[in-house]
Image (tube, rainbow, N blue to C red):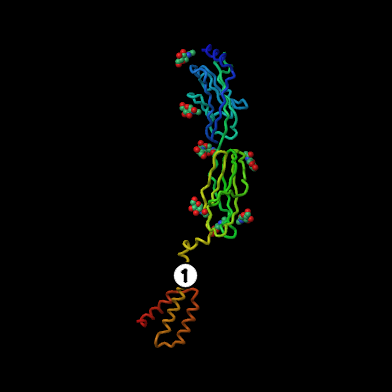
Amino acid sequence: MDLTILLFMTIFGLSDAVSMKRKAYFNGTAYLPCPFTKAQNITLSELVVFWQDQQKLVLYEHYLGAEKLDSVNAKYLGRTSFDGDNWTLRLHHVTIKDMGSYDCFIQGKPPTGSVILQQTSTELSVIANFSEPEILLTQNVTRNSGTNLTCSSKQGYPKPKKMYFLITNSTDEYGDDMQISQDNVTELFSVSVSLSHLFPDGVDNMTIVCVLEMESTNISSKPVILVLPEFHPIGKHLIEISAGIIIVILFPLLVFIVAKTCCKKPGRPRNTTCTSERDSSADRRSSINLEELEPQIASAKPNAE
Ligand SMILES: *[C@@H]1O[C@H](CO)[C@@H](O)[C@H](O)[C@H]1NC(C)=O
Ligand SMILES: *[C@@H]1O[C@H](CO)[C@@H](O)[C@H](O)[C@H]1NC(C)=O
Ligand SMILES: *[C@@H]1O[C@H](CO)[C@@H](O)[C@H](O)[C@H]1NC(C)=O
Ligand SMILES: *[C@@H]1O[C@H](CO)[C@@H](O)[C@H](O)[C@H]1NC(C)=O
Ligand SMILES: *[C@@H]1O[C@H](CO)[C@@H](O)[C@H](O)[C@H]1NC(C)=O
Ligand SMILES: *[C@@H]1O[C@H](CO)[C@@H](O)[C@H](O)[C@H]1NC(C)=O
Ligand SMILES: *[C@@H]1O[C@H](CO)[C@@H](O)[C@H](O)[C@H]1NC(C)=O
Ligand SMILES: *[C@@H]1O[C@H](CO)[C@@H](O)[C@H](O)[C@H]1NC(C)=O
């Protein structure tokens, strides 16, 4: 078997390095492949396979068919798993700092070993999906002050290109400059943009959408429909308004009718009774008491027939 390896070494030399690009999601798993294309017959038990990062720190080593932790750097302990079927190393809980290049080396069985049979480089990039942009009203909508809005999106990577508002059917982009902040632990970006906008004359509602534009895709917020308050208070307050009408108009009216009916009573001197009745009802107008009205209504009834 050593002979075979030597043979391959002489045929292909050391220049045969494969280079690949891989993407991984933040906090997800990165796949660092190490395809051994030269000799299908050689098994893992006859080889030494290991991965290094760009600082030459060892992520993982598979030594003659078994995992070997001696040379693995502490920062990678417990973060990797090896897939023996397709010779791929899985790097778990990927962070932004994991971005960079990785090399996988395949060596022959010692003593022939230490000669590298094949090398694979992987350029790893890390991405994190920004949260769906969210529009927040920082001020209530009025005709005079218009509206102040902010839109924000969190925890993404890499930096987005821009962020803006779209208003109703216009394709114009509205809003201030995009504000970017970076989390100093996760290194993820959060972005926001503000807008101060008046309602154009004759317009009583606007549909506003916020768009976050990235290299390859855009993410849009849910649309927000802003309606000037003058145009919709009636339905909501109908009950309160009717109650107000009853108290303010109907009760004094009732009192007035009762007082009038009493004045029409035959056999009662108009001047004395009615004036005293009016005075007392005027005194009680602020807090009308049904119990006090009832005797009057009762006494009025027989006469009404
Ligand atoms: C990473 O993922 C794990 C679950 O797989 C979750 O519990 C943890 O909160 C995540 N961390 C971050 C920073 O998103
Ligand atoms: C490699 O495997 C093929 C069949 O899969 C076999 O014909 C060949 O003899 C093997 N070569 C060595 C060197 O084992
Ligand atoms: C490697 O193979 C396993 C199944 O054997 C598969 O689930 C995994 O996706 C493969 N990885 C790559 C990077 O092809
Ligand atoms: C990120 O967004 C893309 C589409 O925009 C989606 O296909 C993918 O599943 C998302 N990934 C995560 C981890 O949320
Ligand atoms: C908007 O008005 C409501 C009452 O109508 C009030 O409770 C709320 O605090 C106001 N919001 C702002 C941002 O001024
Ligand atoms: C916006 O477009 C929709 C159809 O796409 C149309 O029904 C609506 O009237 C338009 N609004 C304005 C204000 O132009
Ligand atoms: C992150 O930055 C803030 C202020 O910029 C600082 O107070 C905090 O200690 C930093 N955290 C770390 C882990 O560096
Ligand atoms: C709304 O935005 C304008 C312009 O940025 C600002 O002058 C005004 O004070 C803001 N109003 C509120 C209530 O934040």
The kind of residue tagged 1 is Ile
Residue at disc 1, secondary structure: helix
x then y, percent, for residue 219: 53, 43
Label 1 C-beta lies within 8 Å of the nearest ligand 5 atom: no
Residue farthest top in this picture: 3
Residue 158 lies left or right of residue 280; in this view the side is right
Crowd class of label 1 (few under 14; some 14 to 19; many from 20; radius 10 Å): few
For the residue pair 73 and 47, the one nearer the viewer reads as: 47
Q: Residue at x 37, y 81 (%)?
A: 304
x then y, percent, for residue 140: 56, 57
For the residue pair 295 and 130, the one nearer the viewer reads as: 130
Residue 224 drawn above or below residue 99: below
Where residue 112 sits, quadrant-wise, is: top right
Residue 192 lies left or right of residue 296; in this view the side is right
Where residue 78 sits, quadrant-wise, is: top right
For the residue pair 78 and 5, the one nearer the viewer reads as: 5
x then y, percent, for residue 248: 48, 72
The quadrant of the image that shows the C terminus is: bottom left
Residue 297 drawn above or below residue 46: below
Residue farthest left in this picture: 305
Q: Which residue is mark 1?
A: 245
x then y, percent, for residue 62: 53, 22
Report the number of discs: 1
